[in-house]
Image (tube, grey):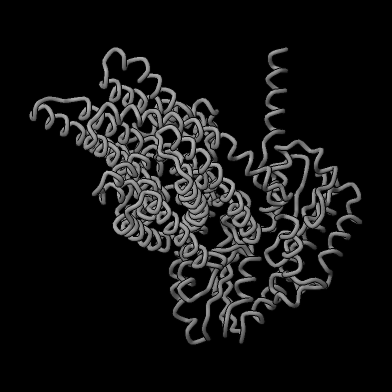
């Protein structure tokens, strides 16, 4: 029992130490959150850079210069290739998130298995290439240490295709947690093998160390990712591979191409090495490539730190969190300045190890690393928002700039300054061209749908579709009901995409009522409505109700009145908050413009995080969640900006709780349909400004 008690105490302490994204966003603790999220990354980067610098010096002394440059270029090319693969896997991750959202998680293993099958095929192709190179080397006079190192690098890359695919399958749903020692396997094993075997077998220790390191990293990755799969109740890699699923379809592979190219261009440190190597014409140019090779881990860390935010950005990829995401983006750019300074300091230590440190070189490195960190934030924000074409265009322009910098600038320090300038320009272009909208989704929650309808220009046509309800009757099996809901969801997604072509959108009023709108008049509505009915697959059991409105704001008011039975929404947000306190004296009311209440702070951290998640879900769906057995969570959102979180005990009379949910739902729908200047008592702009001042 004593061991169990110690384990429980340890788990409780761990839960209390975790800083969750939802709490950081709503409670204004972003600084604590970034420090918690990046704490291992900084330590790993510092250790990796120092070990890698020593390894490069050993490699430089062991191999001829031309072979050394070839190995460096190969490592850069393989890094770009695996980056392309991780970007292409966005197609799989997006599909998995969609399946989870539609409660179709049972299809997720099939999706992962098909991509795993493809990754194994790609890995085998790389291994075949390694085998071919080995045969060619044998025919040409035997496999030397350099050729063996090339083969070991190719084997490591082949394993990485599989491990990245396996990791992405879990990462689409939740983070894969690993302790710090497991993150240092690559460097510790590599240096340990070199120190142990170099006195015995000389430079053959390099390929041996590379091969053992690749196998060790793959084993550790498989171990921790498999634990995550088990937590998610998903089959692990071997059962999925035994299913022998077909590879993804041709259209999925085409859709994966652009994200892959865009993310390959994000990893600019590999491009910098390649561009520098391609333009070597002097000894100074060669020394620059050696310097860039030494700084490769810290240079890569200059953008990989931002990739740690990818999961958070995807979690905030809902319209109701748009204002919070903007604050998160601005805060991440301030963190980028800190990370730029940290990576620069680590790089300076690396330069001291290889020699040649000067004041101008320090300044050039500072410019490059700060610009790299800032660029990384905009790159990952664009990638997580599916803005792949914009990211690709800016990336290609950046590559052209890098080639020009190496071609026309001769001094090593000035070349690094030129790299920093190219990165800074890319950052500013990405920042200025960022899209400022609610996304491209056309199947929205009802509040988001009303806001988009409210802002629609010109005349609009609104249609109400009623789906067949016979399978919802009592006596129908649960399996049949779930299958019917799945068919409705699929039909709704198709219909939403169709009206999206008319600059419209769709939303569920209830499980059987789908509302649509599109720009145009009565004459133009016939075509898209007829097509929409065809996409419903016979599930609509009556003629749609259609109405034409002179403006989007007029239509939004009419539909909000219909959804709320024309309820009164003249209360101000402050009055609503006061109303909750009056109705539930023992409830918890967290006005986000003030400090969190003491009662909320006393709730365990993991439960508090669930409260924030359910508050966000209520703001989107207007339905109370069921994850918390004892507490019911609702929230107040004003024009897409979270204003307050409410928590009550489920032991309170259900009629009182239902009346409060109805009041809150009706107010938020009416507020969503009102133009910004008409929000009762206080404008959305004022609310957002007050929240922003506190959050940032």
334 or 312, which lies in front? 334
636 vs 435, left or right, is: right
Above or below, 283 against 572 in this view is: above
User: Residue at the front extreme?
Assistant: 359
Corner quadrant of residue 37:
top right
83 or 490, which lies in front? 83
117 or 650, which lies in front? 117
Residue 568 x/y as whole percent: 81, 72
401 or 28, which lies in front? 401
Q: Is residue 682 visible?
A: yes
For the N terminus, give its image quadrant: top right
Residue 591 x/y as whole percent: 81, 55
Residue 145 x/y as whole percent: 22, 25
> In percent of the image, x 75 and y 77: which residue is there?
678
Residue 684 x/y as whole percent: 73, 69
459 vs 529, left or right, is: right
> In percent of the image, x 56 and y 56: which residue is there?
317
> In percent of the image, x 52 and y 35: which residue is there?
176
> In percent of the image, x 49 and y 30: which residue is there?
47
Q: Is residue 245 visible?
A: no
318 vs 139, left or right, is: right
For the C terminus, give its image quadrant: bottom right
Total number of numbered discs in the rendering: 0
Above or below, 187 against 656 in this view is: above
Above or below, 520 against 16 in this view is: below
498 vs 24, left or right, is: left
């Amino acid at each position: 029992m004593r061991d169990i008690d110690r384990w429980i105490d340890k788990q409780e302490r761990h839960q209390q130490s975790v800083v969750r994204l939802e709490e950081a966003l709503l409670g204004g603790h972003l600084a604590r959150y970034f420090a918690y999220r990046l704490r291992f990354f900084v330590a790993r980067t510092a250790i990796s850079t120092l070990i890698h610098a020593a390894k490069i010096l050993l490699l430089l002394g062991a191999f001829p210069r031309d072979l050394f440059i070839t190995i460096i270029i190969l490592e850069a090319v393989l890094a770009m290739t695996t980056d392309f693969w991780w970007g292409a896997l966005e197609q799989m991750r997006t599909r998995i998130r969609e399946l989870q959202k539609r409660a179709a998680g049972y299809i997720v293993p099939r999706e992962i298995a098909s991509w795993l099958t493809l990754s194994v095929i790609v890995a085998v192709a790389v291994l075949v290439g390694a085998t071919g190179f080995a045969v060619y080397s044998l025919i040409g006079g035997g496999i030397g240490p350099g050729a063996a190192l090339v083969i070991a690098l190719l084997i490591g890359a082949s394993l990485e295709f599989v491990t990245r695919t396996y990791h992405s399958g879990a990462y689409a749903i939740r983070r894969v947690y690993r302790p710090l020692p497991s993150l240092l396997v690559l460097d510790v094993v590599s240096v340990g093998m070199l120190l142990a075997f170099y006195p015995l077998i000389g430079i053959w220790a390099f390929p041996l160390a590379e091969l053992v390191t690749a196998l060790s990293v793959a084993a550790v990755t498989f171990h921790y990712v498999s634990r995550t799969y088990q937590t998610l109740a998903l089959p692990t890699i071997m059962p999925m591979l035994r299913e022998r699923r077909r590879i993804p379809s041709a259209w999925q592979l085409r859709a994966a191409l652009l994200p892959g190219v865009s993310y390959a261009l994000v990893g600019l440190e590999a491009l910098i090495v390649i561009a520098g190597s391609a333009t070597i014409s002097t000894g100074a140019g060669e020394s620059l490539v050696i310097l860039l090779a030494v700084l490769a881990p810290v240079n890569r860390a200059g953008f990989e730190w931002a990739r740690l935010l990818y999961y958070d950005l995807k979690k905030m990829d809902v319209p109701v969190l748009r204002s919070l995401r903007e604050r998160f983006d601005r805060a991440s750019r301030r963190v980028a300045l800190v990370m730029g300074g940290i990576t620069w300091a680590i790089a300076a230590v690396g330069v001291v190890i290889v020699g040649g440190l000067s004041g101008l070189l320090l300044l050039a490195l500072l410019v490059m690393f700060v610009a790299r960190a800032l660029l990384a934030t905009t790159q990952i924000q664009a990638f997580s928002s599916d803005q792949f074409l914009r990211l690709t265009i800016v990336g290609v322009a950046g590559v052209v700039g890098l080639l020009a910098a190496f071609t026309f600038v001769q001094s090593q320090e000035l070349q690094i300054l030129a790299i920093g300038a190219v990165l800074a320009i890319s950052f500013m272009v990405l920042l200025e061209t960022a899209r400022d909208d609610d996304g491209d989704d056309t199947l929205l929650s009802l509040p988001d749908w009303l806001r988009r309808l409210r802002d629609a220009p010109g005349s609009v046509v609104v249609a109400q579709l009623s789906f067949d309800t016979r399978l919802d009757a009592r006596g129908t099996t649960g399996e049949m009901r779930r299958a019917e809901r799945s068919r409705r969801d699929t039909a709704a997604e198709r219909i939403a995409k169709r009206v999206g072509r008319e600059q419209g959108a769709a939303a569920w009023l209830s499980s059987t009522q789908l509302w649509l709108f599109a720009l145009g008049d009565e004459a133009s509505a016939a075509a898209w409505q007829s097509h929409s009915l065809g996409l419903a697959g016979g599930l609509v059991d009556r003629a749609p109700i259609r109405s034409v409105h002179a403006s989007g704001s007029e239509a939004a008011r009419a539909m909000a009145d219909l959804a709320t039975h024309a309820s009164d929404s003249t209360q101000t947000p402050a009055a609503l908050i006061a109303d909750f306190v009056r109705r539930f004296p023992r409830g918890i009311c967290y006005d986000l413009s003030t400090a969190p209440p003491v009662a909320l702070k006393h709730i365990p951290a993991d439960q508090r995080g669930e409260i924030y998640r359910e508050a966000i879900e209520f703001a989107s769906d207007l339905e109370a969640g069921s994850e918390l057995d004892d507490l019911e969570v609702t929230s107040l959102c004003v024009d897409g900006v979270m204003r307050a979180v409410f928590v009550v005990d489920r032991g309170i009379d259900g009629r009182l709780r239902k009346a409060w949910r109805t009041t809150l739902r009706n107010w938020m729908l009416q507020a969503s349909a009102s133009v910004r200047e008409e929000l009762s008592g206080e404008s959305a702009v004022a609310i957002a400004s007050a929240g922003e001042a506190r959050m940032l």
